[in-house]
Image: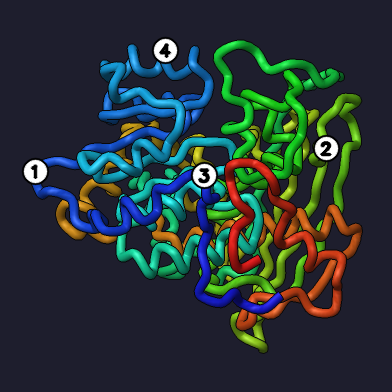
Amino acid sequence: MSKPTRRIFLIGSGAAIAAGVAGRARANAPAESVRIGLIGCGVRGRAYHGRVAAVCDPDAQRLAETAEACGVTPANAVSDFRRLLDDPTIDAVVVATPDHWHAPAAILACQAGKHVYVEKPCSHNFRESQLLLQAAERSGVVVQHGTQSRSRPAIRDAIARLHDGVIGDVLVAKAWNIQDRGTIGHKTPSAPPPGLDYDLWVGPAEWLPYQSNRLHSDWHWWWNFGTGDIGNDGAHEIDYARWGLGVDTLPTKVVAVGGKYHANDDQQCPDTATCVFEYAADAAKPKQLIFEMRLWSTNYPVNCDSGVEFYGTEGQMFLSKRGKLRIVGPRNEPIEESRFGRETGFAHLDNFVDAIRKGTPLNAPLHEAHLSVGPIHLANAAIRSGSSFSFDPESESVISNDGAAKLLTRRYHEGGHWAVPDGL
């Protein structure tokens, strides 16, 4: 699949907002303050309580609860996020929706001249990442990706030490996400509950009837709405694994196997996966990133449910967002072992605001997000197609594997009030 032409998501004819906001683009917020609108009042949305001036959610109950928690007036609590984009007093938005809305909402926000903090993964599929990158470049707004580890001083320091050669030349990074996720059970379609605008919740995704285990949090495990746990918790580990590995491109080979090895329920996404990415950053010395996922186990490597082991020519580093660091030498001789606590949960958002107000460099800019989220989509394509493949980082295309290539995009909801994205 070649890189897309300069096209973007377009809103359907029944939602005339693009023209209205295009003339009021606000690529530079006032220096004294940044008014933020929250799109999505679910689990991730709660992380931004106390920092937002407006809230949005198609679930009336969640919307009301979040508005009260944030001290937001009813006029600034809306069900349709386009109202936030049409509000000239809103400078930026946090996109904390289900995955299928991440790129569409972020692209429309860029079109509206709003700065964007988009939760991980920044897209539901590979093609949407490309479209979001282009929209951000055209708009000139600030776009931060929600990989919060990049704003944690201890993680940043450990990665800097890797790049400075604390364990020599890092050739392999092995990341994992291991936890018991439980089950979403078996349900059947039913009428949406009162107060939920389900049509708006589905938005641009291919239409599926309402089913109670497809909604809040459970959407993660349906391909129509989520990216599985490879794109959920795995997005964090894959991001700082690639960061520490020191590769600034997409992989050249993708090998991934997995499936539902344990769960007996309705979820479609794998509960078990092993993914390997090879990077040909240097033809004489390629590098490798490994990601393991088991969602039915509590037997953790290094007694930690998530983390990354970096293997270098002169030693090994174990690093976890849980606050653990260990460095050993070539013969496993101890060099350092330490613990670090959680920094403020607002550090990443503060960096986003400082980038808007002061021009401070972003800790998780969108081009880095594309390089870390890309492997997630490639791994899912390999698992779903049942085949590994080579990948061309220059053209950003799958080589000689039509089945996997088709999974780098998706089907969209035709006939609803959200049009099919242009350029697909």
The first of marks 3 and 4 along the sequence is 3
Can residue 133 be seen in this snapshot? yes
Q: Is residue 125 above or below residue 293?
A: below
Q: Is residue 416 above or below residue 63?
A: below
Q: Residue at x 78, y 68 (%)?
A: 405
Decide which of 380, 151 is in the foreground and name it. 380
- Asked whether the beta carbons under mark 1 and mark 3 sit within 8 Å of each other, the answer is no
The first of marks 4 and 1 along the sequence is 1
Decide which of 336, 79 is in the foreground and name it. 79
Horizontal and vertical percent position of residue 252 = 70, 76
Horizontal and vertical percent position of residue 314 = 56, 68
The first of marks 2 and 3 along the sequence is 3
Q: Amino acid at mark 3?
A: Gly
Q: Quadrant of the C terminus?
A: bottom right
Q: Residue at x 39, y 26 (%)?
A: 78
Specify few, some or many for label 2: CA neighbours under 10 Å numbering under 14, 14-19, or 20 or more.
some
Specify few, some or many for label 3: CA neighbours under 10 Å numbering under 14, 14-19, or 20 or more.
few
Q: Which residue is mark 1?
A: 32
Q: Is residue 370 toward the left or the right of residue 257 in the image?
A: left
Horizontal and vertical percent position of residue 392 = 69, 80
Q: Is residue 69 toward the left or the right of residue 227 in the image?
A: left
Q: Which residue is mark 2?
A: 268
Q: Which residue is mark 3?
A: 14
Q: Which residue is mark 4?
A: 65
Give me the C-alpha separation between circle 1 and circle 3.
36 Å
- Asked whether the beta carbons under mark 2 and mark 3 sit within 8 Å of each other, the answer is no
The first of marks 2 and 1 along the sequence is 1
